[in-house]
Image (cartoon, rainbow, N blue to C red):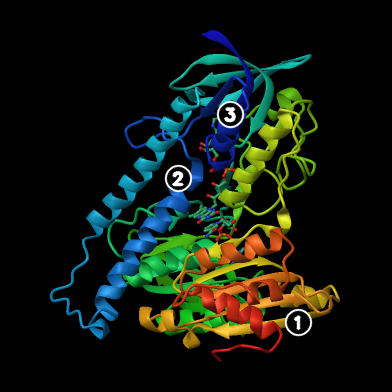
Amino acid sequence: MSTKQFDVVVIGAGPGGYIAAIRAAQLGFSVACVDEWSNAKGGAAPGGTCTNVGCIPSKALLQSSEHFEHAGHSFAEHGIDVAGLKLNLGQMLKRKDTVVKQNNDGILYLFKKNKIAFFHGRAAFAAAAVGTYDISVTGAANETLTAKHVVIATGSNARELPGAPFDEKLILSNTGALTIDAVPAKLGVIGAGVIGLEMGSVWRRLGSDVTVLEGLPVFLGAVDEQIAKEASKLFIKQGLKINLGCKIGAITPGKKDVTVEFVDAKGEAQKAVFDKLIISIGRTPNTNGLGADKVGLQLDERGFIAVDGDCKTNLPNVWAVGDVVRGPMLAHKAEEEGVAVAERIAGQHGHTNFNTIPWVIYTSPEIAWVGKTEQTLKAEGIAYKAGTFPFMANGRARALGDTSGMVKFLADATTDEILGVHIVGPMASELISEAVVAMEFKASAEDIARICHAHPSLSEATKEAALAVDKRTLNF
Ligand code: FAD
Ligand code: NAI
């Protein structure tokens, strides 16, 4: 075992870690990044949850399954007849794996380009001295790294239900949900959150009868109520069976199926048998094997690494970013924190604006939002104006054949500053960026209403919703 010295050692090569490493290298530091994720052949697979079992493979399958659904249902309306449509699930999964590998390879290329030393293995704090930390790496690489600064970006793991551990055969986390090799006739999903809706949509489009069991009595509680209501209507119309207010009881795996006992919203005991069960009830921070106690690294009461607003931990020159710290568990939030930390290490004033982090649920239609919801504004007693515009009245949406949903603006009643923008509809993931930029620059709804938007484009619905704040829509 040898010892190597670096200015910055980053633990974890997910979106938080690998981006922090790149920014630190750009700023002139000597940087190492350690990640333990292996591909099926045992090789390094940097990119974390996001690249390997999260954002990227889920979006690949969402795209493929949407093509399949369009070919079966909406192509005929466009005058395209598809004879003998057949699902080749093996090829669909293979394509998804290829997309993942392209991303893994892309990150390895970026490490090389930025002269970042990458180590494939598990990193743990071995010792702390004044001004330096020793980090042991074990696995494919066996080294001791000495670092002046450490950035922890060790991510999160799927949360299990007590008594129902993931076996990834019948009881699936996100990992198993992305590799089902035959379309299950009956698929159960516990948790109607982001993963439940995205993965439920994938398998419904491919032919599964999908039942979602949600604990809370409301659908998508964090989403603007009007948008959530509209989305719920659309998902139910598509055939997702969403049951709110369920209290989950025993989960019993059999030889080929799994039985879930639950009490429904009416208080009646129910029993459902599924071919596969996805459990998506949130994620827990991952500090396994990091040696936090060895150096006195503080965790909070929920197991997250305790950090201040600048991602500083209780240890000097030790920082933590991404899913392993407070805040939304989103790849782009992790990346922003990674950049900000690298800049702070360099003595600059890196900043993450938590008020303008966009959320997207990649269902069809997509749901996207930034800023405050109407129910939050009411609860906080903030006077606001609201404006909505339906995609039904947008020419591009009609040409696309996707007129579901709306854009909604919420602006301050006095100053007209945009406080929140909420979209359910086609390409909401792309449309939301305009709202993020506007809010970052503290724009008013009137600013967006007066900007020329290309015609015909979905973004005209954004302009029209901004006009609607002042009751001046032109096309509705
Ligand atoms: P991670 O991506 O989890 O990376 C942590 C890395 O650290 C891993 O590679 C792990 O192996 C490594 N590691 C941990 N401990 C050690 C150690 N001791 N030594 C060495 N290596 C270690 N977010 C979005 O913004 N958009 C999406 O569309 C989206 N889709 C998702 C879909 C699914 C199914 C899931 C599960 C998540 C999705 N997310 C999405 C969330 C997103 O994946 C996470 O927010 C993001 O990956 C967090 O990045 P991170 O760098 O903090 O951690
Ligand atoms: P989630 O927090 O989005 O949803 C979990 C759902 O499960 C909630 O509706 C919750 O009320 C419900 N639940 C919790 N305990 C329950 C119980 N015992 N019984 C029944 N229902 C229960 O978590 P999810 O879907 O697991 O995703 C984890 C995180 O990953 C997300 O919060 C998000 O941060 C990230 N992610 C982001 C995506 C995106 O940006 N498009 C896609 C997928 C995941």
Q: Which residue is mark 3?
A: 26
Residue occupying image coordinates x 48% and y 73%: 454
Q: CA distance from mark 2 to mark 3?
A: 23 Å
Q: Earlier in the sequence, mark 2 or mark 1?
A: 2
Q: Which mark is residue 385?
A: 1
Residue 192, given in percent of the width and then of the height, sits at 55, 69
In contact (CB < 8 Å): disc 2 and disc 1: no
Could you classify mark 2 by the number of other residues whose Cα lies within 10 Å: few (under 14), some (14-19), or many (20 or more)? many
Q: Earlier in the sequence, mark 1 or mark 3?
A: 3
Q: Quadrant of residue 206?
A: bottom left
Q: Amino acid at mark 2?
A: Thr
Left or right side of 123 for 65:
left
Q: Amino acid at mark 1?
A: Lys
Q: Is mark 2 within 8 Å of ligand 1?
A: yes
Q: Quadrant of residue 44?
A: top left
Q: Is mark 3 within 8 Å of ligand 1?
A: no
Left or right side of 176 for 335:
right
Q: CA distance from mark 2 to mark 1?
A: 40 Å
Q: Is mark 1 within 8 Å of ligand 2?
A: no
Q: Which mark is residue 51?
A: 2
In contact (CB < 8 Å): disc 1 and disc 3: no
